[in-house]
Amino acid sequence: MRVKLRKWMRENAGYVAIWIFMGLTLLALVIREIGIYTLVVIAPFLPPFIIAMIKMAKELRKR
Amino acid sequence: MLIGSGFPNFDVFPTLLRKKTPKNPINETHASTILHTIFLYLVILPFLYLGLSAIGWSNSWNIAMSFSLGGIIHVLTESFDEKGRRLLYPLSKKFYGIRVLPYDFWTYLTDKKVLALEGGLFIVAVLLLIF
């Protein structure tokens, strides 16, 4: 399945907004709970997460 | 617990570094290694406890338990996808689970029943973090 990501995101803006809202809310609550240590928790996972998102976007264009 | 629950995903690296996408995402390395087994976290538990105690950390048992519990919950939760997980490793290398959720990341993100499930988990997490 080939996906035009920008078009898909425009058409499903509500869906994307719900995911972003859930992620940011939880991030804010974790920061409120453990403060600066949030960085220790999320830092190791940020690079693979960013690479995974970039790779997924590339693969969706290719499919 | 947060670090432990993220730890199994370090086996995503071969998937991220691959040049060719396998035709079936289920065949990729991610979630097929020992990092996605309950066994590993049961083995890590005593060693982490002893290691943390040796360097004088207080609450070393709580930290070790939290880490292992995070890893085990990750593996058990993911066993609900169509790939399943090696729940009985090293006794069996077969993938077990209740296969009701999609495995492929894009399909997962865009599946309505996944959003409902994640929404439910989100509400539980918010309640736990607030109260």
Image (cartoon, rainbow, N blue to C red):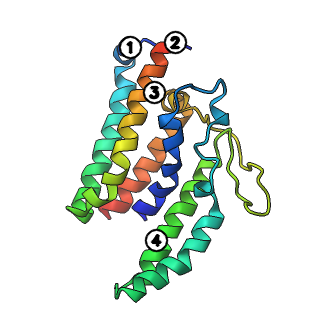
Closer to the chain start, of discs 1 and 3, is 1
Query: Is there one chain holding both mark 2 and mark 1?
Result: yes
Give the CA separation, mark 4 to mark 3.
31 Å
Residue A36 occupies quadrant: bottom left
Residue located 40% across and 55% down the image: B125
Seen at 25% across and 56% down, the residue is A39
**In the image, is residue A38 above or below residue B102?**
below
Q: Nearer the viewer, residue A24 or A54?
A: A54
Q: Nearer the viewer, mark 4 or mark 3?
A: 3
Q: Residues within 10 Å of mark 1 (few under 14, many from 20)?
A: few
Q: Position of residue B119 (x, y in %)?
A: 45, 42
Dot 1 falls on a residue whose secondary structure is: helix
Q: Nearer the viewer, residue B76 or B39?
A: B39
Q: Do marks 1 and 3 share a subunit?
A: yes
CA distance for labels 4 and 2: 41 Å
**Three-letter amino acid code of the residue under disc 2:** Arg
Which of discs 4 and 1 lies nearer the camera? The answer is 4
What is the chain identity of the residue bearing mark 4? B
Q: Are marks 1 and 3 in contact (CB under 8 Å)?
A: no
Identify whether B34 is placed above or below A50. Answer: below
| Lower sequence index among marks 3 and 2 | 2
Crowd around label 3: few <14 · some 14–19 · many ≥20 (10 Å): some
Inter-mark Cα distance, 2 to 1: 15 Å
